[in-house]
Image: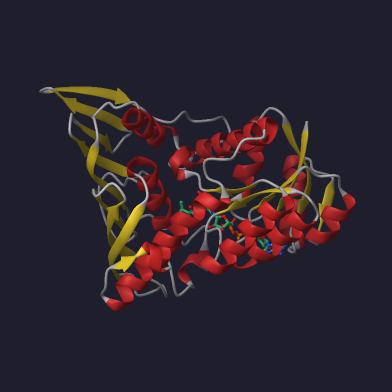
Amino acid sequence: MLRGGIIGAGFFAGNHLNGWNMVEGAEIVALCDTDPDRLANMGNAFGIKALFSDAARMLDSEDLDFVDIITTVSSHRALVELAIGKGVNVICQKPFAENLDDARAMVHAADAAGRTLMVHENFRWQSPIRAAIDAIRDNAIGTPFFCRAAFRSGYDVFAGQPYLAKGQRFIIEDLGIHVLDVVRALMGDVTRVAAHMTRINPNIMGEDVATILLSHDSGMASVVDCSYATQRTPETFPETLLEVDGDKGSLYLKAGYQLEIHKDGSIETRDVSPPLLDWAERPWHNIQESVYIIQKHFVDCLTHGTTPETSGADNIKTLTLVEAAYRSAAGGQTIATTAL
Ligand code: NAD
Ligand code: 89V
């Protein structure tokens, strides 16, 4: 049984703890947060006795195989390097890093120490998204030549995550990062990025609308469009909607988790709704299930000595798209990913 410690007992941590309770082969034995109330409440709720206000003390006191870092991005590099330095494997929440230098330093540290470093980049692990990825990898529509991935919502995300209203960067860094990662999983890596962004909500600091054009290694194109300023009925939070055209057919992931394959003049429709796990709640159940799925993948990789699909090294490619999108939107230019 792998022994894990969690760092960060805030808004999202309960989902991780519920997910870990379902994962075979791992148990969470220790919890750390600098906020004493959050630490005590989460420890009580999940019956964790080994509680720490300092991550170094947790790592020194407990014999851990891995840590799960669920703090906001500014603390990631220090915590990842601390854990890797103690010889412990790491799964770290997105956004992995505030900049590419930090991301590269963390990946280098893990490689040098021979430890596994995975990013909790969970949208590509959502079961409806995975159904679309699997269909495309199984050649259901032939070779894809166009993708649109859209996340448009008016959901009040700031109620649960007030820090999102305070940063200079918002939707590309926090949400677009997931959608960009999904498009990489569907369409492959990216050579050039052109982006436009704006802010509609006057009560936040960063951008809440972004439209991003990606040119892929394959020569094909994708559009990622995200908004937290869109009023729509029904509200689709937190669904990512997909349209992918291939040379043999088209794939659509439509609102309400309906996957359609259009081919040879007919439509095959599959209901790919995520299950409502007993600890989950709508509309978050899609994301909540993906937390369990990605944790299971991490444990499988540790157990079999394989590289995670969303490793730190892989996630640098997604973070590069985030950086490129901000540079493009600021300067009005197309950015080559090799320039970053
Ligand atoms: P939060 O601010 O509510 O909680 C973070 C907690 O970490 C706080 O309780 C804080 O006291 C603690 N903390 C910060 N630095 C620490 C340190 N050095 N040592 C110990 N504890 C420390 O944040 P949140 O909303 O739970 O988000 C955490 C991370 O999860 C963010 O990176 C966010 O982007 C990500 N997130 C991901 C998803 C997803 O679907 N993948 C959803 C929500 C949040
Ligand atoms: O993934 C996240 O960090 C969240 C949400 C899915 C709500 O955008 O902020």
Q: Quadrant of residue 80?
A: bottom right
Spot the residue most to the left.
Answer: 265
Q: Position of residue 220 (x, y in %)?
A: 23, 48
Residue 225 at least partly seen? yes
Q: Quadrant of residue 264?
A: top left
Residue 238 at least partly seen? no
Task: Tell me the residue at 46%/62% (across/down).
Answer: 158
Q: Position of residue 22 (x, y in %)?
A: 64, 30
Task: Tell me the residue at 10%/23% (across/down).
Answer: 265
Location of the C terminus (image quadrant): bottom left
Vertical placement of 158 versus 31: above or below?
A: below
Task: Tell me the residue at 35%/31% (across/down).
Answer: 137
Location of the N terminus (image quadrant): top right
Vertical placement of 130 versus 167: above or below?
A: above
Vertical placement of 307 versus 335: above or below?
A: above
Vertical placement of 62 versus 35: above or below?
A: above
Task: Tell me the residue at 56%/47% (across/down).
Answer: 311
Q: Position of residue 79 (x, y in %)?
A: 70, 61
Q: Position of residue 244 (x, y in %)?
A: 24, 39
